[in-house]
Image (spheres, rainbow, N blue to C red):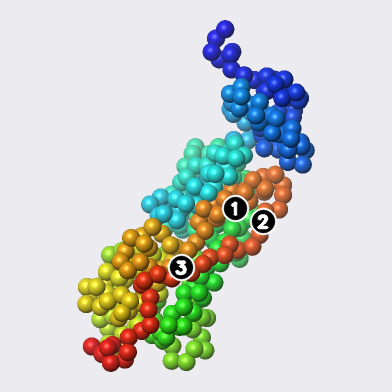
Amino acid sequence: MTEQSARPTSRDVARAAGVSQATVSLVLGGKSPGRVSERTAALVREAARALGYRPNIAARNLRLGTTRTALLVVPALTNEFFARVYTGAAEVAAEHDFGVVLYPSPAGVGPARDPFASARAALDGVIASSMATGALDAIRGTDGADLPLVMLDSDPAAPGAAARVNLDIADGIRQVTEHLLGLGHRRLLHLASAVDSWTFDVRSDALARAVRGVPGTVVRSARAPLEVDAARAAVESTLGAPGPRPTAVVCDGDILAAGACKALRRLGLRVPEDVSVTGFDDLALATAVEPELTTVRLPSEQVGRRGMAALLRVLDGQRPETGDLPVSLVVRGSTAPPPAEADQRR
């Protein structure tokens, strides 16, 4: 007997579990909930494990007319946030015998090139994180009818998505701003991302709303690419301009915050004694800098998990889960009350 013919089949699994081949297909194909009892499903999975059974994916996909593959499009492969999103999506995909292909589209605005000869023939759906919907036309087709699209961290008013998974970004900025106002800060510098994206527009709008009506509060703005050196240069230039010095820098991301801290040190200013700094994302970088960053923690892996779950539900003709994912403020050493007025004179 050859090695290939010795491989266990679904018939062998069915015989070992005492069920039909149809039941085995339902359980191992992720279609058993509501159709097969959990006890029977457990018996099938245990029999498959004991026999070392592996389904013939190619044959099944050809039979079902599906690839069980999703494309996750992100603006950058080097950003820790997107790596965590992928981890979450891949975990859920693996539970349902799906694969996830990770694909970058610089800056998130595209257009993203088709990564295959024809993505519409090689994929079952697309998940896009922090991308513009129109950037995906080359992958999905200009009419968007061929592949279901799940958008993560994107404009809820933009058309074209079968489902959306968003973080409560505005609430994150509100928490940051209320923290700084509570410490006594009234002169803020908003170090904004230069990326033209919905998620960064939300940050700017939320900051403006949070300070509205607070007497004596002034917000200046500077923009920089999501790079440490670019952020450093932007802060140095802004603080070199005439006028009272900001007592706190509100950054659109931890990378920008690291650049802000670097700029303040070069200017002979201390964090947080002279100027407080806040970040956003809670990347590993947030605890690598000194002092550690006060920042907003994003449940990035949960974003990926819910995004993949939403795509699976869309493919199954069901309604995806709705509602923004909550975020939380993490207070660390980079924020403190502002210095006395006498200490701020240059």
Q: Are marks 3 and 2 in contact (CB under 8 Å)?
A: no
Q: Is residue 239 left or right of residue 41?
A: left
Q: Residue 260: x percent and y percent?
A: 31, 71
Residue 291 visible, this angle: yes
Viewer-proximal residue among 112 and 64: 64
Q: Residue 28: x percent and y percent?
A: 66, 32
Label 1 vs 3, first from the N-terminus = 1
The residue drawn where x is 66% and y is 59% is 322
* Callout 3: SS: strand
Q: Residue 302: x percent and y percent?
A: 55, 54
Which corner quadrant holds the N terminus? top right
Q: Quadrant of residue 189?
A: bottom left
Which corner quadrant holds the C terminus? bottom left
Q: Residues within 10 Å of mark 3 (few under 14, many from 20)?
A: some
Mark sitting on residue 306: 1
Q: Which residue is mark 3?
A: 330
Viewer-proximal residue among 179 and 128: 179
Q: Residues within 10 Å of mark 1 (few under 14, many from 20)?
A: many
Residue 136 visible, this angle: no
Mark sitting on residue 339: none
Q: What amino acid type should be assigned to the residue bearing mark 3?
A: Val
Q: Which residue is mark 2?
A: 321
